[in-house]
Amino acid sequence: MDDMVIFGSNKKKLHKTRKAIEAYLETEGLRLNDNWQVFRFDYVKDGKRKGRDLDFMGFRFFRERTILRKSIMLKATRKARKIGKKEKPTIYDIRQMLSYLGWIDATDTYGMYLKYIKPYVNFQYMKRRISRHDKRRSK
């Protein structure tokens, strides 16, 4: 396992949990990296947003929503515009765009999809084209 996130409402308990994990890893001949951190997660109090979001594995997690990291959103919108300009996108382009669609499906970024991606990309066409391509390759 490479990355780990542990949530809790009490910092003391979180620190105890970290120490317990560290002790267990030592018995297995492993060690915990020194770049761990404990911080207050995003929340709203008295109408003001406090704490911070969790930027993890390409996503930004808030209490009430999950969005894509800004750099990934920009790459997806640029790829959609690039595909929209092509008369016939390559299989590689289609696979990349369908991969971005998977990221978008896992987040609360439907508005971004409608505004910046859907006008340029026909996903039904892409899915059919990939399906036909894969069927030909498997024969």
Image (spheres, helix red, strand yellow):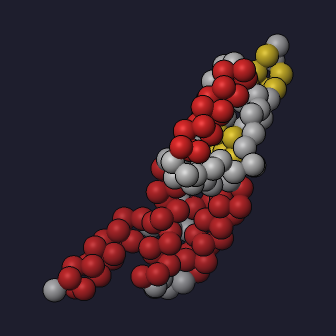
Q: Is residue 51 above or below residue 127?
A: above
- Identify the residue at horizontal 60%, vertical 37% (top origin): 23
Q: Quadrant of residue 50?
A: top right
86 left or right, relative to 59: left
Residue 36: image location, x then y, percent: 72, 43
Q: Is residue 86 above or below residue 39?
A: below
- View extreme (left): residue: 139
Q: Quadrant of residue 10?
A: top right
Q: Is residue 100 above or below residue 78?
A: above
Residue 108: image location, x then y, percent: 57, 42
- Identify the residue at horizontal 48%, vertical 65% (top origin): 99
Give 80 or 96, whichever is nearer the viewer: 96
- Identify the residue at horizontal 69%, vertical 51% (top origin): 33
Residue 128: image location, x then y, percent: 30, 71
Q: Quadrant of residue 71?
A: bottom right
Give 45 or 4, whichever is nearer the viewer: 4
- View extreme (top): residue: 46
121 left or right, relative to 126: right
Can residue 117 be spotted in the picture?
yes
What is the number of callouts on the image?
0
Give 2 or 105, whichever is nearer the viewer: 2
